Image (cartoon, coloured by chain):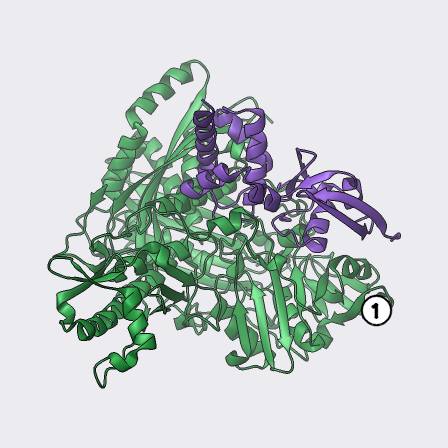
């Protein structure tokens, strides 16, 4: 074990400074140091996707990033995306389609869905299924999630017309 | 939709503005979508410490000594506790039920005392100020093991040469059941064709995305233990924790907030959770245990793992003459507590042949101990096995006599007008709809067109298959499941409904929520029966201090049992409200009704008084009420089915898939389900239970398997090597319904949580065999990995 390291980063637009052990991963930092518990830990080895957050606009697995690596970066979590209203339409679509059951995968699933819609505003069902394949859901069987993302994409398109 | 119920007049659920049968969004979703839920892993309490369990690396080993002295000196360490020390705080248990005659098991301790019986059994607890520090210290605990022979292959467990895991039990046979109905030998002799196959089902597990987690908080000043746990059965946990810690149930409160997936994984009592309760009491502070993913694979109950030889005899016209099975399953070293590990095998015996008119049936199942992780009830307990055997045999028989799979089912499924009737194992069916479901499925999937497409593609060397699977599902269990066997697992549920000071409604229910929509359907029922808008109903669940006593949510019972209790409680409150309203309005209760949050005239529906106003008078100006009147704006009702031990449901599934014969990969193209769960309170939630259940069944069919080596080492205990379905691999699933409400309850709802899982794998196996028919390959093993497919094709 080595000594704590000072880090400074931006989390959901707020400046955060902390002293952390070098081994601390970003997911645990967000959850345990900042109490941002919307970032969930499912497997801790980068497979299930439940800890997905954004660093400088790109989605990453917070369990595979060390907190010290996030120093100087801008991190966004589900709490930030919810408060800014950026994914409000996706959340409405998820609610109407019941695209979540236990909800444990959902914050990360919304992150991944938003990432897709930013890249590809009119994804096919296959593209949605492909893009979300890094995020496990054990409850829904995925179809409702695919439907919700498809509906949100369609609604966004209609609004921009 | 076909409605088969005919009732006189309007029931409470048919009231104007009914929410029953309507798709409305669940009330708790925003919290979860915004990352503002409270899962156990999110909970932090003052003075809370973290426990890490040191687990046996051996499948079977004597513990000669444990030395925690070095670990105790590590930073942040609060305690290192072994099984002997903890046994002064918590007593061991034996997972048996008296109605499973002959079932035996050995005492299991919260932490192993002198012997570890599976790789992953806890041998010591390390408590520290953080999980990371506890993990560091766990590496400094020295355990001297004497490695013992491990019993791993269930087929060898009963061999006299195999060591007996628990010598006090005499052998490795935990349970055996033999059943026979009718003249089985004569029926087989009279059959034109008899087909036999061995069916092999891999061990798999639930992989809840949130691992098991518990925070136990012993307050020594109050002499009370609060357990925060993502359990499906809070009152069961309360009872068992109290019993083994030497407390009264009053001294234990179980709080269950958001739960990150359960599927039956979180309905059991696990040794490490019991150890966490005991550690909190021992150390007088809150202790948190959150399993990591490796621990989840090694200690969350596993399921299935059956080998079963099945036979069916048929006449040339397709009539089923007899079924016979000889089933074997390995359950690990202990029968789980308190539901036992014999239920799945028992269900297999009960359910084989269930959808069909079968007069002759013989079955044997044997349940054996082995040095692997414990096995117990996971979603659709026994159903996927019984269904795959029954439906697999039926397809083999159909192929033998040259009959279409749909036709052989049509000729043998119980007629829709034959009810009530029973099965050869004594199951009682109130009302099922196999034939209507089959007809609807054939129509939905366009069966004839698919067959034509299959034939065309076969000529182009593209191999697609259709698989059909009928099933029955056990739902709404009465005390017959566990209570009669001596387990203090309630089969009844309670709901309390009250009007608050603003005329809104607070509802406390003993069923629990793990994402199925328990909260939503309870609110829909209460709002409907009372006549209030849905937004006015707040549902409280998952807290033994704040809900009526009841069973919780498992075995597809929440809607059928908890829902009926909610309906009756809301009706009772409505009657109480109308009595007060009649007094205030100088009317009679039967001249009034409640609609749209107000008391109205029953005749012309004119609004007489807002509920808000009624609540104001009752709570703040009771002096204005007639003398002697004491309003009761709270009502409680409980419910348990008494007439039928189980409310059976039925359904049928179909899979359409393509097998790549060069690579062995299977592409699922489409899946259909028709099911009959009786009254649907929220059709969208029913459909989503079905879809989610199907995909869990598809996971078992194609990917999921806990792979043990011959030494009892689990070789794929991580998410990269243990595969679960991903969105890219799953098909769209069309769901249709036939509706045959149970007449036992006013609501008429049966369960829907397990129907999807019950038949999905069977449909896929049958579809794969249908696709491979030109190759003469027959596979009766899951998961259907590329390796299994290519071996069957003789390519490797």
In the picture provided, is B543 more to the left or to the right than B49? left
Q: Depth check: give the residue in front, B11 or B362.
A: B11
Q: Which residue is mark 1?
A: B72
Q: Depth check: give the residue in front, B761 or B136.
A: B136
Provide residue A153's location: percent of width, then percent of height. Answer: 48, 29
Q: Chain of mark 1?
A: B
Q: Is residue A96 above or below residue B625?
A: above
Taking the view exactly as shown, the residue that stands out farthest to the top is B460
Q: Could you tell me which residue is drawn at 55 percent across and 66 percent down?
A: B269
Evaluate whether residue B198 shows in this view: no
Tag count:
1
In the picture provided, is B549 more to the left or to the right than B647? right
Label 1 element class: helix
Name chain B's colour. Answer: green
Q: Depth check: give the residue in front, B41 or A74.
A: A74
Q: Is residue A45 above or below residue B346?
A: above
Quadrant of res B504: bottom left
Quadrant of res B557: bottom left
Taking the view exactly as shown, the residue that stands out farthest to the bottom is B628
Q: Is residue A132 above or below residue B322?
A: above
Name chain A's colour. Answer: purple
Provide residue B258's location: percent of width, then percent of height. Answer: 52, 57
Q: Could you tell me which residue is drawn at 50 percent across and 65 percent down?
A: B340
Q: Depth check: give the residue in front, B458 or B51.
A: B51
Provide residue A43's location: percent of width, then percent of height. Answer: 65, 46
Q: Where's the C terminus of chain A, which quadrant? A: top left
Binning the other alpha carbons within 10 Å of mark 1 as few (below 14), some (14 to 19) or many (20 upward) gives many
């Amino acid at each position: 074990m080595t000594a704590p390291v000072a880090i400074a980063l931006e989390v959901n637009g707020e400046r955060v400074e902390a002293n952390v052990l070098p081994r601390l991963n970003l997911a645990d930092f967000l959850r345990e140091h900042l109490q941002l518990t919307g970032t969930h830990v499912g497997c801790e080895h980068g497979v299930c996707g439940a800890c997905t957050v954004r660093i400088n606009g790109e989605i990453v697995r917070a369990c595979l990033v060390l907190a010290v690596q996030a120093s100087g970066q801008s991190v966004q979590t589900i709490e930030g995306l919810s408060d800014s209203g950026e994914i409000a339409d996706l959340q409405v679509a998820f609610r109407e389609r019941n695209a979540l059951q236990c909800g444990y995968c959902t914050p990360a699933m919304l992150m991944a869905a938003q990432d897709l819609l930013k890249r590809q505003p009119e994804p096919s069902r296959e593209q949605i299924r492909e893009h979300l394949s890094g995020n496990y859901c054990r409850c829904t069987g995925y179809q409702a999630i695919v439907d919700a993302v498809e509906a949100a994409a369609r609604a966004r398109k209609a609004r921009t017309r | 939709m076909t409605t088969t119920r005919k009732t006189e007049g309007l029931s409470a659920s048919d009231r104007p503005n009914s929410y029953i049968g309507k798709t409305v969004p669940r009330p708790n979703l925003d919290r979860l979508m915004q990352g503002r839920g409270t899962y156990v892993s999110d909970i932090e309490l003052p003075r809370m410490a973290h426990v890490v369990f040191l687990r046996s690396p051996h499948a079977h080993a004597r513990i000669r000594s444990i030395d925690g002295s070095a670990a105790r000196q590590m930073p942040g360490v609060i305690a290192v506790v072994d099984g002997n020390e903890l046994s002064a705080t918590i007593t061991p248990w034996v997972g048996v039920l008296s109605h499973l005659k002959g079932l035996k098991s050995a005492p299991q301790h919260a932490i192993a005392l002198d012997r570890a019986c599976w790789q992953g059994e806890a041998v010591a607890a390390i408590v520290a100020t953080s999980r990371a520090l506890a993990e560091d210290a766990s590496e400094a605990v020295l355990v001297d093991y004497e490695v013992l022979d491990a019993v791993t292959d269930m087929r060898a467990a009963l061999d006299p040469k195999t060591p007996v895991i628990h010598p006090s039990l005499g052998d490795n046979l935990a349970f055996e059941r033999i059943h026979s109905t009718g003249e089985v030998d004569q029926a087989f002799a009279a059959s034109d064709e008899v087909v036999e196959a061995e069916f092999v089902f891999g061990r798999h597990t639930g992989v809840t995305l949130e691992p098991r987690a518990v925070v136990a908080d012993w307050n020594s000043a109050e002499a009370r233990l609060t357990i925060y746990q993502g359990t499906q059965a809070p009152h069961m946990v309360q009872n068992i924790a109290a019993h083994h810690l030497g407390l009264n149930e009053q001294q234990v409160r179980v709080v269950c907030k958001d739960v990150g997936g359960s599927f039956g994984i979180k309905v059991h009592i696990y040794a490490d959770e019991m150890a966490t309760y005991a550690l909190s009491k021992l150390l007088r502070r809150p202790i948190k245990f959150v399993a990591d993913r490796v621990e989840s694979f090694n200690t969350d109950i596993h399921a299935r793992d059956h080998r079963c030889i099945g036979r069916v005899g048929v006449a040339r016209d397709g009539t089923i003459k007899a079924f016979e099975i000889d089933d074997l399953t390995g359950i690990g070293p202990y029968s789980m507590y308190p539901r036992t590990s014999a239920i799945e095998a028992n269900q297999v015996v009960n359910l084989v042949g269930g959808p069909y008119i079968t007069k002759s049936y013989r079955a044997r199942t044997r349940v054996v101990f082995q040095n692997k992780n414990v096995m117990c009830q996971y979603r659709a307990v026994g159903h996927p096995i019984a269904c795959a055997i029954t439906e697999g045999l039926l397809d083999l028989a159909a192929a033998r006599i040259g009959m279409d799979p749909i036709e052989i089912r049509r000729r043998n499924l119980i007629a829709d007008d034959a009810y009530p009737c029973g099965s050869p194992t004594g199951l009682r069916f109130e009302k099922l709809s196999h034939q209507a479901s089959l007809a609807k499925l054939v129509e939905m999937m366009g069966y004839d067109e698919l067959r034509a497409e299959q034939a065309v593609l076969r000529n182009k060397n593209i191999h697609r298959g259709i698989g059909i699977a009928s099933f029955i599902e056990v739902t709404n269990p009465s005390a017959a499941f566990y209570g009669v066997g001596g387990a203090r697992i309630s089969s009844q549920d309670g709901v309390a409904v009250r009007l608050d000071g603003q005329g809104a409604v607070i509802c406390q229910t003993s069923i629990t929520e793990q994402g199925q929509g328990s909260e939503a359907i309870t609110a829909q029922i209460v709002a409907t029966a009372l006549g209030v808008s849905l937004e006015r109903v707040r549902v409280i669940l998952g807290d033994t201090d704040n809900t009526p006593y009841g069973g919780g949510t498992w075995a597809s019972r929440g809607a059928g049992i908890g829902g009926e209790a909610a309906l009756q409680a809301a009706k009772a409150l409505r009657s109480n409200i109308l009595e007060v309203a009649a007094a205030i309005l100088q009317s009679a209760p039967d001249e009034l009704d409640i609609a749209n949050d107000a008391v109205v005239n029953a005749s012309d529906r004119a609004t007489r008084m807002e509920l808000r106003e009624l609540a104001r008078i009752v709570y703040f100006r009771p002096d204005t009420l007639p003398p002697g009147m004491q309003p009761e704006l709270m009502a409680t009702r409980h419910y348990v089915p008494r007439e039928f031990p189980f409310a059976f449901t039925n359904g049928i599934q179909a899979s359409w898939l393509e097998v790549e014969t060069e690579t062995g990969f299977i592409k699922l193209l489409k899946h259909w389900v028709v099911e009959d769960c009786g009254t649907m309170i929220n059709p969208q939630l029913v459909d989503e239970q079905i879809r989610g259940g199907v995909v869990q069944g598809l996971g078992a069919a194609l990917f999921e398997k806990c792979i043990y080596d011959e030494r009892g080492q689990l070789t794929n205990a991580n998410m990269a090597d243990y595969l679960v379905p991903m969105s890219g691999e799953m098909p769209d699933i069309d769901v249709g319904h036939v509706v045959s409400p149970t007449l036992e309850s006013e609501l008429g709802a049966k369960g829907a949580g397990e129907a999807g899982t019950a038949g999905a794998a069977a449909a896929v196996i049958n579809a794969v065999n249908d696709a491979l028919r030109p190759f003469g390959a027959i596979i009766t093993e899951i998961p259907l990995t590329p390796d299994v497919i290519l071996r069957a094709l003789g390519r490797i």
